Image (cartoon, grey):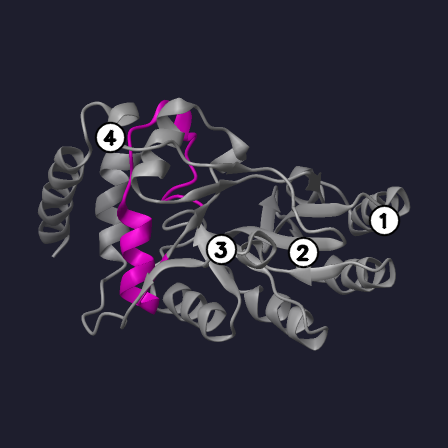
């Protein structure tokens, strides 16, 4: 079975490579890069590195406050998007009217890699929708990344406020960072957080901080919206029906041979 997925992925790599124009700049306009919100008094809460088990807590906190978040999912980072639980989490976020977006397949630095189409195909299989937005890992991009994103009709999104959860900030420290940005009261905020981030057996989870952050931001007069809402653009390139043929997590194992 693993051999089947290796062969299937080999074919996918070949077809994806030939699908890209040789002269990217002449064939397609480069992707737009969004670094901040554009509508005054809005805040876009974004969450990277999922889908993880804490997504249910994160979405509950958002829905309890009538807020919308944007989830930048990986294909195979903390888990395989085709695994039963991860696929269920992606579908749940989509069905709960949260915005789903791409954070690439394996969270590699895109400036040193060739193009990767697989995470978009996973989204379409699981939800029927193809995201219109992507976030490059570590926020790193170059002209090659923007060219490929442009071909795929994606908008690149970074951030202008980091909650610090992925770099070891404690819950107390993260709350103080939200306090500080609210005190400065910029016109808009585009925040970076993570569903879950592990570091030497110590777990730092966004959902512990999220209710506090929502309360502070709302109290300061910010409207909490998705990335697509504040830009006034569709969240998806197209929306259809999810695939009735499921993929196995073996696909992720096969892909790791090529991606790692």
Is tag 2's residue or tag 4's residue first in the polypeptide sequence? Answer: 4
As measured in the structure, the alpha-carbon distance from the residue carrying label 2 to the one carrying label 3 is: 27 Å
Position of residue 69 relative to residue 48, above or below, is: below
Is tag 3's residue or tag 1's residue first in the polypeptide sequence? Answer: 1
Mark 3 or mark 1: which is in front? 3
Asked if residue 142 is among those painted magenta in the image, a careful observer would answer no
Q: Quadrant of residue 147?
A: top left
Q: Residues within 10 Å of mark 3 (few under 14, many from 20)?
A: few
How many dots with numbers? 4
Identify the secondary structure beneath mark 4: helix
Identify the secondary structure beneath mark 2: helix
- Could you say which is closer to the camera, residue 137 or residue 22? 22
Residue 11, x across and y down, in percent: 9, 43
Tell whether label 3 touches label 2 (CB within 8 Å).
Answer: no
Please say whether residue 149 is visible from this viewpoint. yes
Query: What number is the disc on residue 182?
Result: 1
As measured in the structure, the alpha-carbon distance from the residue carrying label 2 to the one carrying label 4 is: 40 Å
Residue 65, x across and y down, in percent: 72, 73
Q: Residues within 10 Å of mark 4 (few under 14, many from 20)?
A: few
Position of residue 259 relative to residue 47, above or below, is: above
Is tag 2's residue or tag 1's residue first in the polypeptide sequence? Answer: 1
Residue 107, x across and y down, in percent: 43, 39
Tell me the magenta residue range.
103-130
The residue beneath circle 4 is: 27
Tell whether label 1 touches label 4 (CB within 8 Å).
Answer: no
Identify the secondary structure beneath mark 3: loop
Mark 2 or mark 4: which is in front? 4
Q: Report the side of 213 relative to 28 (left or right).
A: right
As measured in the structure, the alpha-carbon distance from the residue carrying label 2 to the one carrying label 1 is: 18 Å
The residue beneath circle 2 is: 206
Query: What number is the disc on residue 233?
Result: 3
Q: Quadrant of the N terminus?
A: bottom left
């Amino acid at each position: 079975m693993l051999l089947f997925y290796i062969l299937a992925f080999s074919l996918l790599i070949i077809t994806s490579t030939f699908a890209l124009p040789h002269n990217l700049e002449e064939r397609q306009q480069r992707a737009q890069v969004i670094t901040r919100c554009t509508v005054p008094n809005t805040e876009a809460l974004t969450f990277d590195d999922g889908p993880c088990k804490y997504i249910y807590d994160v979405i509950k906190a958002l829905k309890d406050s009538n807020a919308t978040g944007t989830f930048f999912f990986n294909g195979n980072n903390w888990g395989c998007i085709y695994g039963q639980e991860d696929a269920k989490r992606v579908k749940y976020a989509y069905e709960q009217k949260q915005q789903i977006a791409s954070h690439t397949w394996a969270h590699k630095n895109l400036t040193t890699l060739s193009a990767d189409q697989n995470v978009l195909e996973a989204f379409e299989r699981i939800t029927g929708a193809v995201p219109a937005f992507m976030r490059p890992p570590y926020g790193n991009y170059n002209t090659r990344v923007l060219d490929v994103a442009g071909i795929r009709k994606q908008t690149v999104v970074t951030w202008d406020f980091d909650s610090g959860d992925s770099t070891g900030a404690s819950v107390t420290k993260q709350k103080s960072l939200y306090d500080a940005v609210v005190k400065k009261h910029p016109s808009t905020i585009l925040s970076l957080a993570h569903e879950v981030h592990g570091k030497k057996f110590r777990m730092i989870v966004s959902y512990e901080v999220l209710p506090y952050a929502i309360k502070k931001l709302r109290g300061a007069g910010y409207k909490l919206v998705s990335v697509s809402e504040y830009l006034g653009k569709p969240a998806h390139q197209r929306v259809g029906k999810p695939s009735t043929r499921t993929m196995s997590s073996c696909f992720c194992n096969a892909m790791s041979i090529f991606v790692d």
